[in-house]
Amino acid sequence: MTTIPARLAQSTQVSKSLEEARKRATALYRDYYRSAPEICSLYALDVPPSVMRAKIRSKFEQNRHIQDLAVLDLLLLKGRQEYQETMNVWKQVPQLMKWFAEEEAPPKPEGFLQKFYASRDEGRAGV
């Protein structure tokens, strides 16, 4: 497949209202959602499209509460850039798998002693 850099490029937009920003966010979400099977096949991921779609939804849900138009426009710009880079295969597999890293990470220690032992064990890993 030939990479066409301008294939998914869009000009920068400034939202005039929250409704307009919501429509742009919905369009971006739909683009990602429809492309999940293609992303999995382009990068030969051992993740089914349903899991990819669930991860995409959770990423969008994290920013659902934001009401500032400037922040929303910036997030939409970055999201659109990520989409273009992903679909043009300008990323590597580890960059995509980073989306799933937080689920595979061990739980963070909570108490003082657990944090102490965890930091001590990290120091011994290099020995």
Image (cartoon, helix red, strand yellow):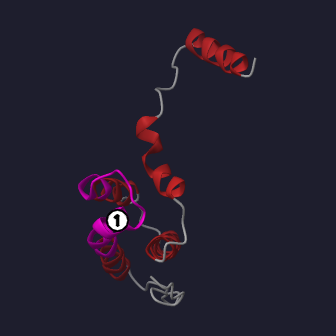
The amino acid marked with disc number 1 is Ser
> In this picture, which residue range is highlighted in magenta?
30-52
Residue at coordinates 68% horizontally, 20% vertically from top-left?
125
Magenta span has 79? no
User: Is residue 127 shown above or below 31?
Assistant: above
Residue 69's spot in the image, x, y percent?
Answer: 47, 74
Magenta span has 39? yes
Q: Quadrant of the C terminus?
A: top right
* 41 or 76: nearer the viewer: 41
User: Is residue 101 shown above or below 70?
Assistant: above
Q: Residue furthest top?
A: 113
User: Is residue 43 shown above or below 14?
Assistant: above
Residue 5's spot in the image, x, y percent?
Answer: 54, 87
Q: Is residue 23 left or right of residue 82?
A: left
User: Is residue 114 shown above or below 85?
Assistant: above
Residue 39's spot in the image, x, y percent?
Answer: 37, 66
Q: Is residue 28 left or right of residue 5?
A: left
Q: Residue furthest front?
A: 1
Q: How many marks?
A: 1
Residue at coordinates 43% horizontally, 63% vertically from top-left?
43
Residue at coordinates 51% horizontally, 26% vertically from top-left?
108
Q: Residue furthest right?
A: 127
Q: Secondary structure at mark 1?
A: helix
**Which residue is label 1 attached to?**
41
Residue 61's spot in the image, x, y percent?
Answer: 34, 56
Residue at coordinates 52% horizontally, 20% vertically from top-left?
109
Q: Main secondary structure of the magenta part?
A: helix
* 116 or 121: nearer the viewer: 121
Q: Quadrant of the N terminus?
A: bottom left
Q: Residues within 10 Å of mark 1 (few under 14, many from 20)?
A: some
* 54 or 85: nearer the viewer: 85
